Image (spheres, helix red, strand yellow):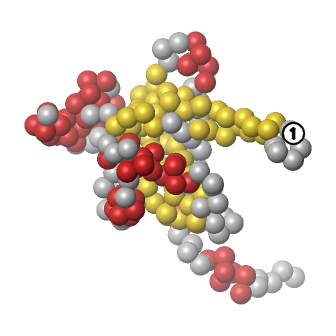
Amino acid sequence: MFKTDKNARNAFMTKFDPSRAFRGTNWEGSGHYWQRVDAAVFDFNWKGISCLNITKTIIKVFKTSEQEAAKTKHGVGEEVTNRILQTNTNRERLVCEFIGCCVEMRPTEVPLDEIEKATEDDQPLQYVVVEVDNEEVYWKDKNTGETKGPITDVRYKRIVPWSEVLRGVTEEEAERFFPDGLLSNLAEADEVLV
């Protein structure tokens, strides 16, 4: 007869959130895209290592050359996640490149309070659109000389003004990714600020 260990169940159920059951993870791959930021949240991975999960939705795919088309891993409408682990030796650079791109600061000038603000529950970066040109990266293991990889080097190029996004997507895509005329309202605010 099978029997549940209540201590194991309690440990398993700690921080258990049923709403996450159908949120599959689609790790961010190579390609040139416009991405709408959906969330930037700190969490723990399955090993208990803290990480920053940056979830985005692809709203435009660039395939201006055969080379670009060949490296494209995602299509319009796909949700992708870029997970930056606490154990990643480049974590400061990766986090500051993302935040810096979103708030138009140099990565080396991003203060800690900007990172804290960007990851708060109200998600102030939600609906920001960034342009990325990601590459697959391979490397040699220092000990064995064996080729490892690929991993995706997420390369944030710039924040895309909402007025440019409005001109760069179809009406259907604007409504799909920015419901209830949100993109038009954001684009109008963009124009006022210029």
Q: Quadrant of the C terminus?
A: top left
Q: Position of residue 27 (x, y in %)?
A: 59, 44
The answer to whether residue 77 of the structure is visible from this angle is no
Q: Is residue 109 left or right of 86 when viewed as pictured?
A: left
Q: Position of residue 172 (x, y in %)?
A: 31, 29
| Relative height, residue 152 to residue 24 (above, below) | above
Q: Quadrant of residue 66?
A: top right
Q: Quadrant of the N terminus?
A: bottom right
Q: Is residue 38 left or right of 21 when viewed as pictured?
A: left
Type of the residue with mark 1:
Gly
Q: Secondary structure at mark 1?
A: loop
Q: Residue at x 32, y 43 (%)?
A: 104
Q: Quadrant of residue 59?
A: top left
Closer to the camera, 53 or 21? 53
Closer to the camera, 192 or 165? 192
Q: Residue at x 52, y 48 (%)?
A: 94
The answer to whether residue 100 of the structure is visible from this angle is yes
Label 1 Cα crowd, 10 Å radius (few <14 / some 14-19 / many 20+): few
Residue at the extreme bottom of the image, as rendered: 6
Q: Position of residue 28 (x, y in %)?
A: 56, 41
Q: Is residue 143 left or right of 103 when viewed as pictured?
A: right
Q: Residue at x 59, y 78 (%)?
A: 14
Task: Identify the residue under disc 1.
Answer: 145
Q: Residue at x 60, y 57 (%)?
A: 85
| Relative height, residue 117 to residue 108 (above, below) | below
Q: Position of residue 43 (x, y in %)?
A: 53, 65
Closer to the camera, 114 or 152? 114
